[in-house]
Image: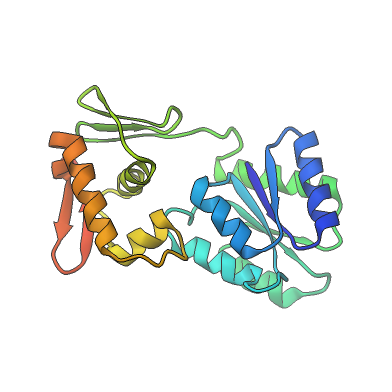
Amino acid sequence: MIYCVEDDQAIRDLMVYTLKASGFEARGFENAPAFWQAVKKGLPRLVILDVMLPGEDGLTILNKLRLSPVTADIPLIMATAKGSEYDKVIGLDSGADDYLVKPFGMMEMVSRIKAVLRRSGSETGKVKDLTCGPVKLDEGRHRVEVAGRSVSLTLKEYDLLKLFMEHPGQVFTRDIILSSVWGMDFTGETRTVDVHIGTLRTKLEKGGDLIRTVRGVGYKMEVADE
């Protein structure tokens, strides 16, 4: 799925139409709130992001994506105004993978998307199998097993486990976990993290021992051979 964040409806609709006609799945969003709401429900393979958006602009969105461990590796192409060298430089320095200069042709857009996906290794849309000790997460089937036995998790428990397993040994504060799993605009308490960690440990049984509390900081998933 490719997410196109563009406030001009005519351009946005044309981008989505072209991508679908080229064999991609695509969705369009007119502003940051709509985009973040979609990201909460599912991560895209690639994002095309207009710099000039109402409210939260494209560069701010880009910085937030790169700061979160959940979204940091999503390939991203910035769309900049013609002659806006400053936006291009800032975007690339902030972690954009490529840029398109408006007005751009739809075939150029498709070509750049394919090139970025090839460089990022995402062109085939391959999903990951993650293993840590007795715990195995099959992203393709959205399935978790502990010592070969299937474990039923809620969506947030699954996302929490996936975050840990993608970054074994890395310590996450409660605030980073809230931002990464619950979303950038989550306004609840950090106690939410502790509750979900507790239920996740229980469901994982012996695999739950790998999720360690780092006193005064947060949590991490222990590397299995430590």
Answer with left or right where residue 158 lies relative to residue 17.
left
Most foreground residue, 34 or 92: 34
Is the C terminus in the top left, top right, bottom left or bottom right quadrant? Answer: top left
On the image, the x and y values in percent for residue 187 come to 40, 67
Q: Residue at x 61, y 37 (%)?
A: 123
Residue 83 screen position, x and y as percent: 82, 73
- Furthest residue toward bottom: 86
Tell me if residue 117 can be seen. Answer: yes
| Count of residue discs | 0
Question: Where is residue 61 shown, x and y percent of the image?
Answer: 58, 66
Q: Image height check: is 22 above or below 199?
A: above
Q: Residue at x 24, y 62 (%)?
A: 191
Which of 109/1 is in front? 1
Q: Quadrant of the N terminus?
A: top right
**Which residue is at a point 20% across and 36% down the rendered structure image?**
204
Whether residue 223 is visible to the viewer of this picture, yes or no, is: no
Query: Would residue 36 be found to the left or right of residue 49 on screen?
Result: left
> Could you tell whether 220 is left or right of 67 in the image?
left
Residue occupying the point 56% across, 58% down: 36
178 vs 23: above or below: below
Residue 78, quarter of picture: bottom right
- Give the residue furthest to the front: 188
